Every structure is written in C-alpha cells, then in structure tokens.
Image (cartoon, grey):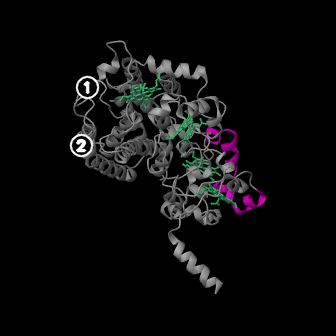
Amino acid sequence: MLLLALSAQSAAGQDAQPAFIGVVECARCHRSPTPLDQESGATDWAALTEFDTWYRHDKHSQAFKLLDSERGRQMGQILGIDVLHDAQCLSCHCNLLPHLPPLSELEQKQGVSCESCHGPGSDYEKPHRDPSWRRLPGSEKEKLGMVDVRDPRRRAKQCLSCHVGNAAEGKLLTHAMYAAGHPPLPGFEIETFAREMPPHWRPLADKPAFIRDDPRILEAIHEKPDEVHAARSVVMGGVMSLAESVRLLSEQAAAIEPGQWPDFAMFDCQMCHHELQSPSWRQRRLADDRPVPRPSQPRMRQWPTVLVELGIGHVHRGDDNARRQAREQLAELLAQFQQAFDGTAWGSPRAADHRLPAASGALLNWLEALAEQLDRAGYGRSDGRKLLAELCVLGDQPSLDYDAARELAWALEAIGSALPFGEAASADDWQRALAALDRALLLDLPATQQRSILDPRRQRAAYEAIGNYDPAEVRRRFGEAAKLLGAE
Ligand code: HEC
Ligand code: HEC
Ligand code: HEC
Ligand code: HEC
Ligand code: HEC
C-alpha cells in the first residue's frame, strides 16, 4: 500500500521542479578524489577537485561576501535596501531562482556556487555519478535539471543570465543600482570569461584517448574530432549575447506600466553620459547610425552585435551574395527593433509598447535560425584562421565603441590562442599584435580572487582606457594583426 501510495505520489509530482541541494553536498565528492574514484575511472572524466578551484580561486565563491563590502553597504544605504537579504542583489550574487525554494542563509553565503551554473541538483545528484551519464545527450541531462554547460550555446545563456541579465530569473541590474555605485558590467565574451574564471574542468584534449575517441561522448558534449572548439564557442556566444540582450530589453519593456520607459540601464550608457568636449568620436559615430539618433535618444549597446557579423560570415563563407543579404537582414531587423524606441525627442513609450513585441520576436527568430546554422557548421583549423582574418576586418571599422572593439579583440585572442601558428604568423609577432590591442583596450579582467574589480588602480586604468579610447588607433592595430595573418 505504502509503495503504491509513494509511486502514485511521484507520478503526480512528475512535473515538480528539481530543487537546490547546496554546495556542501557537491563538495562531498568534488573536492578530492578517493582511491575508489580512481579505480572506477571517474577521474578519467572529472578530476573531482572542482570545489577547491572554485573555493580558492574563482571570484564567484566571493560574490555574496562582496555584498557586505564597503561598496556593497554603500549601495544598500543609497538604495535603502538590505543588500544581504534583498532578492534584487541575491539573484546574481548567490544561488537563487524565483521559482525554486531558496537555500538556507548559510548556503546563500557561498555565493555563485555549483548549482548556479550546473542547475539544481536534487534529481541528477544520484544518476550523474555513473560513468554512463557522460554519454547522455544534453537534452537528457537537462530533463533532470542539469544545465548542459558543455553546449556552447546553453553555457553562454547561463552565464549571460547574470552577466547581462535575465528578467524571468529576476536578474536585473538597474540604473539606480549603477547610480548607487555598482561597477558597470563589462561586455562579455564567453571563452575569455571562462578562461579567466579560472576553469575547474579539463579540456577534452587533456582527457584519456579512449574518451577523446568515443563518438558518443563527442556527440554528447557537442565536440567534433579535430575541431577548434574555442572557435565554435566564440561564435555561438556572440549570437547568444545579442539574443539575450534583446530578450532582456523587450521583457523589461513588457513588464513595466504602459507608457513608461524601460530602465536606462538597458541602453548604451554613452548615449546620455557622453563627454562634454566637442567634437568627440562618441558624437561623430552617431552620424553613421541609421536612422541617425538625436542626442539622448537611447540606443541599444553595440558590443552584443559585433560577433553576430562574424557568425554570418562563417555560415555564408564563399557566397558573397548570401552573406550580403544576411547582413542586410540583420541591419534591418536591428533598425526595426531600435525604431520601436524612437520617435520625437525621447520618443513615445506607447509606440515602443506597440511595436516592440513584433520587432523583438522577428529579431530573436532570425538569431535562433542563425544559431542553428552555426551549430551545424564546421570549425576546423582553416576555419579558425579565416575567422581570425575576419575579426581583423571587423575591427577595422570606423564606428566601433570601446566595448565593441574589446569584444572583437577578446575573440581574436580566444581563437588565436587555440590555433597553432606557423605558416601565417610567428607566435612572437602574434603576441606583439595582441599586446598592442591590450595596451589600447585593457583586455585582461580583474578575475580570480587574487585581484579586485574595485581596486582604485585598476579602476583608474579601466576608466583611462575608456576615456582615451581612440577608434582610429584601434583600427590600425586590427589592421596590423590582419597583415600578420595574411588576410585579404
Ligand atoms: C556522491 C558523489 C557526488 C556528489 C554528491 C556530486 N557529484 Fe558530481 N560527479 C561525481 C562523479 C563520480 C562524477 C564523474 C562521473 C563519471 O565518471 O562520468 C561527477 C560528475 C559531475 C559533472 C560532469 C557531468 C557531465 O555530464 O559531464 C558535473 C557537472 C557534476 N558532477 C556536478 C555536480 C554538482 C553541481 C553537484 C552538487 C549538486 C554534484 N556534482 C554532486 C560525484 C558526485
Ligand atoms: C544582473 C546581475 C546582477 C545584479 C542584479 C547585481 N549584481 Fe552586483 N555584480 C554583478 C556582476 C556580473 C559583477 C561583476 C562585474 C564585473 O565583472 O566587473 C558584480 C559586481 C558587484 C560588486 C563588486 C564586487 C567586487 O568584486 O568588488 C558589488 C559590490 C556588487 N556587485 C553589489 C551588488 C548589489 C549591492 C546589488 C543589488 C543592489 C547587485 N550587485 C546586483 C551582477 C549583478
Ligand atoms: C560560473 C559557473 C560555474 C560554477 C559556479 C561551477 N561550474 Fe562547474 N563547470 C562550468 C562550466 C562552464 C563547465 C564545463 C565547460 C566545458 O566542458 O566546456 C564546468 C564543468 C564542470 C565539471 C566537469 C569537469 C571536467 O573536467 O570535464 C564538473 C565536475 C564541475 N563543473 C563541477 C562543479 C562543482 C562541483 C562546482 C562547485 C564547487 C562547480 N562546478 C561550479 C561552470 C561552473
Ligand atoms: C537615457 C539616458 C541615460 C542612459 C542610457 C543612462 N543614464 Fe545614467 N544617468 C542619466 C541621468 C539623467 C542621470 C542623473 C539622474 C539624477 O540625478 O536623478 C544619470 C545618473 C547616473 C549615475 C549617477 C551619477 C552621479 O553623479 O550621481 C551613474 C553612475 C549612471 N547614471 C550610470 C549609468 C550607466 C552605467 C549607464 C549604462 C548602463 C547609464 N547610466 C545609462 C541618464 C542616463
Ligand atoms: C548566478 C549569477 C552568475 C552566473 C550564472 C555566472 N556569473 Fe560570473 N559573476 C557573477 C558575479 C556576481 C560576479 C562578480 C563576483 C565578484 O566580484 O566577486 C561574477 C564574476 C565573473 C568573472 C570575473 C569578472 C571580472 O570582471 O573580473 C568572470 C570571469 C565570470 N564571472 C565568468 C563567468 C562565466 C564564464 C560564467 C558561465 C560559465 C559565469 N560567470 C556565470 C555572477 C554570475
């Protein structure tokens, strides 16, 4: 009877959501492997030391503690909220989702932890330890709550939910939070950010040959033999950055009172906060935009769009016509999306309410189709080199802003460092080209626990890089990198 009742209960609870179990649970096994783990072959797959990397080096494990820093407390005072308990902050600074029961306060203090990225563990905790789990397609893992972070597209979405924002998950950085002192979110390039975390996983190349050669594993983890995985990841991450930015902006717009503007933080800060000297490149670049915006007419940020161009080039390589058409389609869709916000002076918010759903829907569908094509595309070494050459061409444009140029330079570094050089450029020349871009754009991140985002020296360097940003100089640097690669 009891068994029957239990099984009826579990059938009824079939669409019950998986729940968080907390990092302490994960740490039981993911801290130091036992001899049994080695014998069973588990460590051929996962080192089982992931906890230590995260706890000792990864900034994510400090994300909650830093709410209680001087800056965090200052923000709380200005905003009049308790930053250690308010979901507005906890949503991105610890493990919290609006539709799941929250973890205990003690667990929340662990910051952005295993399940923030890998998904709530109650249902996969048991089955995932079995070596057969490795071969499961990502869609099966997702059914038990495990986020398929090995899929570059899914992974990007997961990271972007906090590094750009996600309205459905309650992860929203507002203009008021910026004004209260939140550091501005930098652009996000997935490979660069993953490398800087630092990674607690071993790349496929470092796993034993019987794993590297297993076609079912390769399929399950979205890799192909001999592919430059970083290239796939950069391009997919680029498409996802635009998709998630558009989704955030339109969901935000849908959630507010009719006739109100979405939060200022959703837009390009420099549309309103430009320098007072005139003429400046920030004012000049607007003249290249279509339609030409009036001062203080908000524009979407530019950085999430630049790697989509790279993706278009990759899908339509060798077919200039199709490529031009796709570029025009994207420009048109972006313009329609933008126009939903335009109008007189500030524009009419009612017009935005009215036009946004169709405009954002069309853009998101188009990006989804591009992502499908990119998913099927190949990423061999010669593709990797062509992508590098195209990045240099994209960098050699007149109207890139700082974050957009930085996005391209990060992508260049991420794909370039995954390729063996030889014929095209010597490794030294390549390093010199990257160093020149780094001097102009400050490419490194204050990631890991050894460095601080709010270190005054670091902040001065960051603001100087933005303040002194000279599009013409950065163009030259990309041009020099192009020559090294023998780009046409
Ligand atoms: C009782 C031990 C145990 C616990 C508890 C545990 N794991 Fe694991 N985990 C393992 C083992 C063993 C493997 C390697 C399985 C294999 O051989 O493929 C693994 C593999 C993984 C993988 C790689 C999966 C894949 O598809 O490649 C992830 C991610 C992971 N664990 C995350 C977690 C998270 C997050 C938690 C906490 C919610 C957790 N684990 C709790 C033992 C455990
Ligand atoms: C949309 C997600 C999101 C929300 C919401 C959010 N943050 Fe953040 N926060 C971040 C990210 C991402 C960073 C790292 C920024 C970077 O890379 O420079 C950060 C950095 C910070 C820092 C600097 C940490 C350091 O390393 O010194 C503080 C302090 C902070 N946030 C406080 C808050 C407070 C207080 C709130 C609520 C009022 C809040 N945040 C809401 C995502 C968020
Ligand atoms: C900020 C996001 C994030 C957090 C936090 C995080 N992970 Fe991961 N983890 C990832 C990503 C991304 C990958 C794999 C990417 C890939 O294979 O390309 C990964 C891979 C893994 C793997 C596979 C290892 C391998 O060698 O293939 C294990 C196991 C794992 N994580 C466990 C954990 C545990 C345990 C924690 C908490 C102590 C944790 N992760 C915290 C993002 C995260
Ligand atoms: C549509 C125009 C607009 C956009 C876009 C915009 N802001 Fe603002 N911002 C303003 C205005 C106007 C004020 C002054 C508000 C006030 O005093 O009430 C302001 C104030 C601020 C302040 C406080 C300055 C101070 O001295 O107190 C900060 C910081 C700030 N904005 C950051 C940002 C960031 C970061 C972004 C982009 C993510 C951004 N803003 C986007 C219009 C904008
Ligand atoms: C639940 C929200 C959340 C998720 C998901 C998340 N992050 Fe973060 N990330 C943060 C916060 C908050 C910070 C700032 C932490 C701090 O300063 O202590 C941060 C900081 C970072 C930093 C350091 C940033 C800097 O400016 O130096 C890197 C790198 C990073 N994250 C990479 C990633 C990657 C890669 C992923 C996906 C695999 C990811 N994050 C997923 C919230 C998140």
Label at residue 294: 1
> What is the x, y in percent for residue 301?
37, 33
Q: How far apart in space, not on screen, are marks 1 and 2 (Cα)?
A: 24 Å
Residue 358: percent from left, percent from top: 26, 49
Residue 80 image position (x, y, % from top left): 55, 35
Q: Which mark is residue 329?
A: 2
Q: Depth check: 271 or 367 in front?
A: 271
**Residue 264 shows up from this direction:** yes
Q: Residue at x 49, y 36 (%)?
A: 414
Residue type highlighted by circle 2: Gln
The residues colored magenta run: 34-62
Q: Residue at x 31, y 13 (%)?
A: 279
Find out whether residue 56 is within the magenta segment: yes
SS state under label 1: loop
Q: Look at 54% across and 64% down and name the residue there.
A: 144
Amino acid under disc 1: Arg
Give the quarter of the image for residue 382: top left
Please tell me how crowded label 2 is: few (under 14), some (14-19), or many (20+) other residues with Cα within 10 Å: some
> In terms of depth relative to the viewer, which is nearer, 409 or 403?
403
Dot 2: what SS?
helix
